[in-house]
Structures are given as structure tokens and as C-alpha cells.
């Protein structure tokens, strides 16, 4: 909501979820159902699962590459998933300035 400069009433219009229910969710007074999650995600034009991941930077929320990456990961198979995991771990280690290079584990890709 903040990223789009929306108030609860705007989210109500976009999602069909009542402002009262949105307020209860934001104040952690009520749990979110999968139906409500789906309605909110549709309003924001993101996959529902992305709203379940806490701490995502705002630019990730709008990225179309994350759902694509997940699709690639799912379709990669076990060896490909292991490779993606290792590359993500290695790249994340490089995020901090001065971080040492994380070597790629020596595993055979078949």
C-alpha cells in the first residue's frame, strides 16, 4: 500500500476486501485466508505467495522476474535446483562490500 500510496479504502476498492478486514489484518487482529490473500494479490498484480514472504524490498514486489525465477527453479529438477541454490548462496555472499569470494562446491553436473 505504501509503495503505491494507497490508503485502506483504495485497497478495498481494488481488492473487494472490506476496509475493516484490511485494518484487522494490518493490526494483526485477524488471520488472512487464502481467498483474501488472493484478492489482495490480484489488487497489487502480484502472485499471492509473494505476499507471504516477509521483508521483501519494494522493488522485488514489482519484479516480474521473481515468479519467472521460481518457475525455472521448479522446472530445473534436483541437479539444476542444487546449482541454482549454490549460485544464489554465492551471489548473496558478494552483497557485502569486502566479502570473500565463496567458492562453488565441486559437484558433478550431469
Image: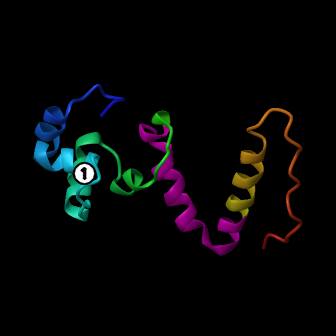
Which quadrant does the C terminus fall into?
bottom right
Left or right side of 87 for 43 = left
Q: Relative to 81, say whether 46 is above or below.
A: above
- In the image shown, does 79 or 14 lie closer to the viewer? 14
Q: In the image, what residue occupies the spot 86% across and 63% down?
A: 105
The spot of residue 96 in percent (x, y) is 77, 37
Residue 94 within the magenta-colored segment of the rendering:
no
Q: Is residue 16 visible?
A: no
Q: 17 left or right of 106?
A: left
Specify the quadrant that holds the N terminus.
top left
Q: Magenta segment, which residues?
A: 60-82
The residue located at (85%, 57%) in the rendering is 104
The residue where tag 1 is placed is 25
Percent x, y for residue 3? 36, 29
At a point 68% along the width and 59% down the height, the residue shown is: 84
Q: Quadrant of residue 29?
A: bottom left
Around disc 1, counting alpha carbons within 10 Å, would you say few (fewer than 14), some (14 to 19), or many (20 or more)?
few
Residue 76 within the magenta-colored segment of the rendering:
yes
Give the dominant element type of the magenta stretch: helix, strand or loop: helix
Amino acid at each position: 500500500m505504501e509503495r503505491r500510496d494507497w490508503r485502506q479504502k483504495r485497497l478495498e476498492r481494488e481488492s473487494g476486501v472490506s476496509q475493516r478486514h484490511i485494518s484487522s489484518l494490518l493490526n494483526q487482529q485477524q488471520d488472512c485466508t487464502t481467498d483474501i490473500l488472493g484478492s489482495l494479490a490480484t489488487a497489487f498484480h502480484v502472485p499471492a505467495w509473494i505476499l507471504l514472504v516477509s521483508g521483501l524490498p519494494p522493488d522485488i514486489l514489482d519484479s516480474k522476474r521473481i515468479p519467472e525465477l521460481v518457475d525455472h527453479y521448479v522446472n530445473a529438477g534436483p541437479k539444476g535446483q542444487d546449482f541454482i541454490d549454490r549460485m544464489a548462496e554465492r551471489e548473496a555472499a558478494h552483497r557485502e562490500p569486502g566479502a570473500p569470494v565463496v567458492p562453488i562446491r565441486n559437484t558433478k553436473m550431469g
